[in-house]
Every structure is written in structure tokens, then in C-alpha cells.
Amino acid sequence: MEQTQVREIVRRVEGAPLRDLLRVSMDEVQVQMDSYLDPALDALALYRRWERQQWAVADLDLSEDARHWGRLEEDQRDAVRRTMILFFIGEQAVTDTLSPILHAAPHEDERIFLATQIADEARHAVFFQRYFDEVLGIGGGLHAALERVGPEATAGFRRIFDLHLVTATERVRTAPADRSAWVEAVVTYHLIIEGYLALTGQRNLLRFFRAAGLLPGFTTGFTAVARDESRHIGFGVLALRRRLAEDPEQARVIARHVLELAEATVHTVVNPEQRLRAPDPAQLSEALRQSPLEARDFSIGSLAKRLRSIGLSETVVDQIQDRYRGLYDQLWARYEEIHGVEHPVRWYQRWAEAG
């Protein structure tokens, strides 16, 4: 893509008011997100974007979504609900655990930006709460909704949020001067939870809803969420690049922790214990197909791009990519062992081999 096209996409995504985000694709948000890898960008520049990109959950029109939801097949509602549940739990979890990272941030501009991020995460939790109440029919306030959806979380998801995130942020809270603890917390939150898990899920959901012409209110709001999180991910890269410049030994900390999180991360994505009820991809139009191979390559490639921008060596980045890619193969095979059926990825592998 030519630089003039990139600049135009970034300008349009960054400047779009809420009402125009329905016409902004996740691929365009990704172009804007990649622009935040620019080493010249600083935390105050991201803060200024936060000021310009405010939006209100109350301004979303969800009336059409309620009609669409009622027309979906139960299998479709179940799959969409399950994915939304994980995002809802995740937004609430990070809202509750991010403050130690803010208080221990080494630089003032980092603390200022992280304060905006906490506000963003609270807004995202309210967005899901409103959607659950008005469209999915799960009411009773935020606490009641969390109790209702909590058991749906997967084993990998629980390890990421209840173990790794809580452990990392608690270490920062109890030892705020420990720079390696702070780096591990940012890796966990900004690179893995937002830059890998959330980004992949957002991309899949938004691409499907746009192709199917479904849930315009959710699509608008979730695109706003994705634009917010592009700032957060950009900040994580910026902050880790700074720590590496201050202390080159932090490269080992970053690489080690990315590898430590690999199994739980890929387990969350593949979720081999959950039997999929996806339609036969051969019966879907190409626009509606969601290839696990393409999603895997996108997720691993995005992570590698950020690790290179932070300053990790190509050799280390290649090792990380190989580890993540191998875990997908292992967990797809594990799915087949558990359920005694072929994983849908096999259709896409045969389709790719056939050309």
C-alpha cells in the first residue's frame, strides 16, 4: 500500500466521529494501529488522540440489533454470545487491575496516558453491559451480568486473566520499583491481552458482522472499542521500547514472558475443549468464511511486528513465532482427540493445498 493511501486511511480512522465508524473496516483500523509503531510517536501524542476520539455508549442506536438478534439461529446466537461474554469479562478484569501499572510507570507522560486507558476500559465494560441488557436480554446491572456470564470463560482465558494478569499486576503493586515486573505486566496486558487476544477476536467478529450485514449498533461500538485499543497497543510498544533503550537486559524479560504466556494464549484462541458448531465452510460464501489459518497467521504476524518495533532481534522473534505456530497445530490435534471429529481448520488446509 502506498504511503499516501496509508496516510489517508489513518486520517479517516482517527478523525471519524462515532456515527461514521460503521463505515470504517477493521482492516482500516489495523492500518491506523500499525502507524503507531512509528518510533517518533510519544505518549503525549497518543493522549492527544484520546482527547479527539471521545465517544459515548449512550449515543449508540441498538434498536436494529435487537431485531437482528431475534432473527438469528440459536447456534449463531450461542457462538456470538460466547465470544461477547469473553470480551465482557475481559474488559471488566482489566478495568479492575490496570491501576498498579499506572502508579508504577516510570515517566509522567506514561502515567497520563494510562489514566486515559483506565477510563477507556470502564467505557468498554459499560458498552458490553448495555448490549447484554438491551439486546441479549441479560439484565440486572453490571454485577449481575458478570455473575451470569462468568462460568462461560474457557480454561485458557481464566489462566490469562485470573492467573497471569493478576499475578503480574500484583507484583507491580507490591514492588513498584521493580522494572522487570512492570515490563512483564505491560507484556501481559498490552501485547498479549489487547494486542493478540482482543485484536484477533475483534477482527473476526467485525469482519463477520460487516460481511453478513448484521448488528450495526454493535459494529459501530465495537469499532470504537478497537480504535481505543489501538492507542493502548501502540502505548505498550512505545513503553517497552523505552525500557529496552534504558536497559538492554529487558529484551530477555520481554521474550521470556511472551513465551511463558504462549500456551495459555493459544489455548484461549483454539479452546480445544469446546465443541464447535460452525457451519460447513464449503456451504458459505467466501466473504463469510473465517479461516483459522488466516487468523493464526494474522495474530502471530502482528505480534512479531510489534516485537521487532520494540527492539527484539530477528532470531528471537522467529523463535517466538515458531513456538506460537506449533501450539496451534498441537491444540487443533487435541480438539480432534477430545471430540473424535475433524477440526474445521482441516477444510481450510485442504482448500489452501488445492490452490
Image (cartoon, grey):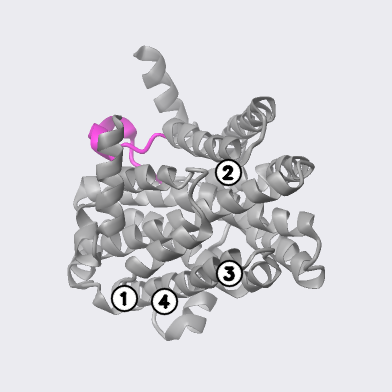
- The mark nearer the N terminus, 2 or 4, is 4
- Residue stretch in magenta: 277-291
Which numbered disc flags the more N-terminal residue, 1 or 3? 1
- Provide the secondary structure element on which disc 1 rests: loop
Side of 193 where 251 appears, left or right: right
Circle 1/circle 3 CB separation < 8 Å: no
Residue at 41% x, 76% y is: 126
Q: Residue 280 colored magenta?
A: yes
Closer to the eye: label 4 or 1? 1
Which residue does the numbered mark 4 point to in the structure image? 126
Rendered view: 2 above or below 50:
above
Q: Amino acid at mark 3?
A: Ala
Is disc 4 in contact with disc 1, using a CB cutoff of under 8 Å? no
Instruction: Tell me the amino acid under the disc marked 4.
Output: Val
Q: Which mark is residue 93?
A: 3
Tell me the tag on residue 56: 1
User: Which residue is identified by label 2?
Assistant: 272
Disc 3 to disc 2: CB gap under 8 Å: no
Q: Is residue 211 magenta?
A: no
Helix, strand or loop for disc 2: loop
Q: Quadrant of the N terminus?
A: top left
* Left or right: 165 as drawn, with respect to 306: right
Quarter of the image holding residue 307? top right
Return the residue nearer the eye: 213 or 44: 44
